Amino acid sequence: MKKSVPQDVLNLLVNNSRKTNDKVSNGDSYANVQSYDLTNPDYKIHDLLPTLELIYRRFAQNFRHSLYNLLHTGIESKFERVDSLKYGDYINENRATEVQHLFRVQSLKCSGFFALDTKLVSAMVELFFGGPGDSSDDGDREMTQTELRMVRRFLKSAIDNLQQSWETILPFRVRLPEYDSNPVSTIFTSDAELILVSRFRLKLANKEGHLHIVLPYRALEPVREKLHTFKFTEQDPEWRQNLRNSILMAPVEMSATLCNVQLSLEQVLKLQVGDIIQADMPKLVSVKIAGIPCLQASVCRDDDMLALKVSRKVNSKIALQNKEDV
């Protein structure tokens, strides 16, 4: 015989079912939900940007001095930012007034390219030959052989500084091939490929323009761990000093064993209150800091306090090595 379900229980089940349907049908609850793909390379690029910015800030500083030696006049070279974007989005920017030149990074087995604002080329030629560098020619034409040679000298200086800026992290050997009017087409086959664009602003005389250093993201993927673990203390003296000051303020435990006495278990069990244990006080005791012998000291008194007078320092590296060997 089947038992009937009470009416109040049926009403409760119906009401809960209606509430659930209302929540599912209400699209506003999920309006702000966005998909997040952790396998997307764009997600991992953000870990590399601080290191890349540090590299290219150093490059901008060194490149300014190289351009001064090349053109014998004051040059402004300013790092702006590193962008990660798709190649198709980059070529949609105005690329008509720039010269692009391929370079090969032999150590990473990849290719990239420089993009230089053409209005800077005529200014460089004038400055190189002693002119004021204020030509009104914006370079919207085919470049002369003199200008092409100047561009190569400019890029060779850029490559020297680029290698120097990278060498603190990893070898960055760059080779500049012969001039190619359309080098980009030999590097990227898809508009969706991810690239890293390092943007610089140059000012020569009264001419101001851009310099871009473009690398495919896939080139840095094999060395991303080196970039990610790069110690900023090696590049930023102020940050290193702050870190050192913080470490010096860390509390450590100092200990010293004044004497050691060997007793048998029978003697220990016979000890009573008031018994005197005879011990020979050593002339020097070892003072340990955080468990590592660092000092030799003699036992003395300071007023009514027992004290230690430091006699000499101990080589902590040798002491630590001996401790590990034991």
Image: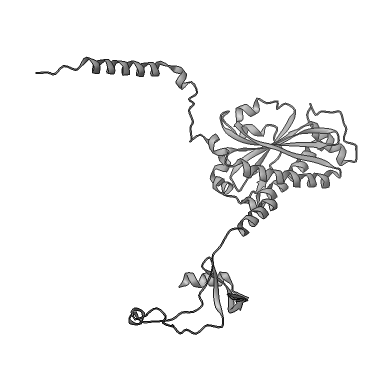
Write the residue at 74% across / 43% down: 60
Quarter of the C terminus within the rendering: bottom left
Q: Nearer the viewer, residue 99 or 307?
A: 307
Residue closest to the far left: 1
Does residue 294 lie above or below 209 as drawn? Answer: below
- Extreme residue toward the right, this view: 131
Figure quadrant of residue 27: top left
On the image, the x and y values in percent for residue 188 come to 59, 33
The vertical placement of 17 against 81, above or below, is: above
Q: How is the image coloured?
A: one colour
Quarter occupied by residue 211: top right
Task: Judge from the rendering whether residue 147 lies leftward or rightward of residue 217; answer left or right.
Answer: right
Question: Viewed as shown, does residue 160 lie left or right of 33?
Answer: right
| Residue 196, placed above or below residue 12 | below
Q: Residue at x 28, y 18 (%)?
A: 12
Place of residue 100 in the rendered image (x, y in percent of width and height, measured from the top left)? 70, 34
Q: Nearer the viewer, residue 310 or 243?
A: 310
Closer to us: 296 or 74: 296
> Does residue 237 appear in the picture of this structure?
yes
The x, y position of residue 312, in whole percent, is 62, 76
Viewed as shown, does residue 145 lie left or right of 218? right
Q: In the rendering, at what x and y percent does residue 145 appear?
A: 80, 36
